[in-house]
Amino acid sequence: MDESNISNLGVEEIAEFIEGLAPGPAADEGFKFGDPQAQVKGVLVCWMATLAALRHAVAEDCNLVICHEEMHYPYAAQHPGLEKYLTWTVNRRRISWLAEHNIVVYRAHGMLDDFCILDDFGRLLGLGEPVVSEGFFRIYDISPRPVAQLANEVKRCMGMNYLRVCGDVDRIVQRPGPLWGGLGLSVNVGFIEGLLRYYPDVLIAGESDEYAMFYAIDADIPLIETSHAASENYGLRHFAQYLAANFPGLKVVFDECPVPWEAH
């Protein structure tokens, strides 16, 4: 895009660009707050529109926030009827901040998973090229090593001091299957079962929970859990860079959502 036209760029044009990257948008994607016909001053790309990310947008004079995760609680796919929840503390605080600072929020979820986040998780982990690539399913082939060694390598790649592992840490594995983002959660156990049909011998998840971990244990497959946000930040940074490259002169800021916990 010509830099001279950036001053007239509308948020709808950014949305159209995103929607051209992958099939979509799905029902859970699109504009979530603000005026879709507003002009863009700057764009902030983030994992979730947390208060910290929204404050970052204001500090950088960005009036369009592109978030990957749902802005409101509870998760809309499981709890339809948002009007019942707008008075919840976090929803009220986020909406008040958005309204006060005239910010537009656009959610790009599955579209960005498809465009880059899924495969970027494999690249972040240094797994090479997948030997299975069907839909959202990926399987990699690495040199054989114990689960404990692989977990340490994952920890290093993710820049994390701690992660969780369930299953036999001494087992030799060589066929990892990634469950990036929240696909390691029990609400997505159908995806886990689908991935098992491609015969991985170890799972590397973003976020998981004990229900899903017992599923993995009874399926006799070790599971390494990292972080939901950390497993997707790498791909979201890639998208922010791609957006900036395709709109020269547009201010694009990436907000890296931190892992929200620490081990004691």
Image (cartoon, rainbow, N blue to C red):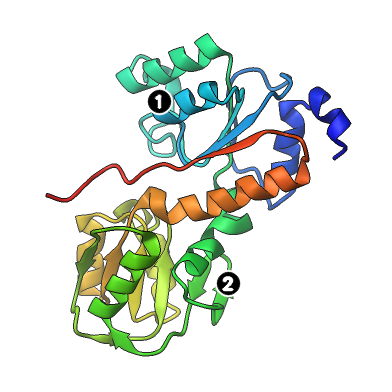
Residue type, label 1: Leu
- Disc 2 crowd rating (10 Å Cα; few below 14, some 14-19, many 20+) is few
- The image's mark for residue 177 is none
Query: Picture quarter containing residue 145?
Result: bottom left
Q: Give the CA separation, mark 2 to mark 1.
A: 36 Å
Give the residue drawn at x 64%, y 48%. Answer: 241
Give the residue drawn at x 42%, y 73%. Answer: 177
Pinpoint residue 216: horizontal percent, then vertical percent. 26, 69
Pinpoint residue 103: horizontal percent, then vertical percent. 58, 19
- Tag 2's secondary structure? strand
Taking the view exactly as shown, the residue that stands out farthest to the top is: 100
Foreground: disc 2 or disc 1: 1
Pinpoint residue 209: horizontal percent, then vertical percent. 24, 54
Query: Picture quarter containing residue 252?
Result: top right
Residue type, label 2: Glu
- Disc 1 crowd rating (10 Å Cα; few below 14, some 14-19, many 20+) is some
- Tag 1's secondary structure? helix
Q: Is 234 drawn above or below residue 193 in the view shown?
A: above
204 relative to 117 in the view: left or right: left
Q: Is 93 drawn above or below residue 13 in the view shown?
A: above
Q: Earlier in the sequence, mark 2 or mark 1?
A: 1
Give the mark count.
Answer: 2
182 relative to 19 in the view: left or right: left
Pinpoint residue 102: horizontal percent, then vertical percent. 58, 14
Of residue 159 and residue 165, the one placed in the foreground of this image is 159
Q: Is 141 drawn above or below residue 166 in the view shown?
A: below
Taking the view exactly as shown, the residue that stands out farthest to the left is: 264
User: Which residue matches tag 2?
Assistant: 134
User: Which residue matches tag 1?
Assistant: 51
Q: Is 118 drawn above or below residue 40 in the view shown?
A: below
99 relative to 83 in the view: left or right: right
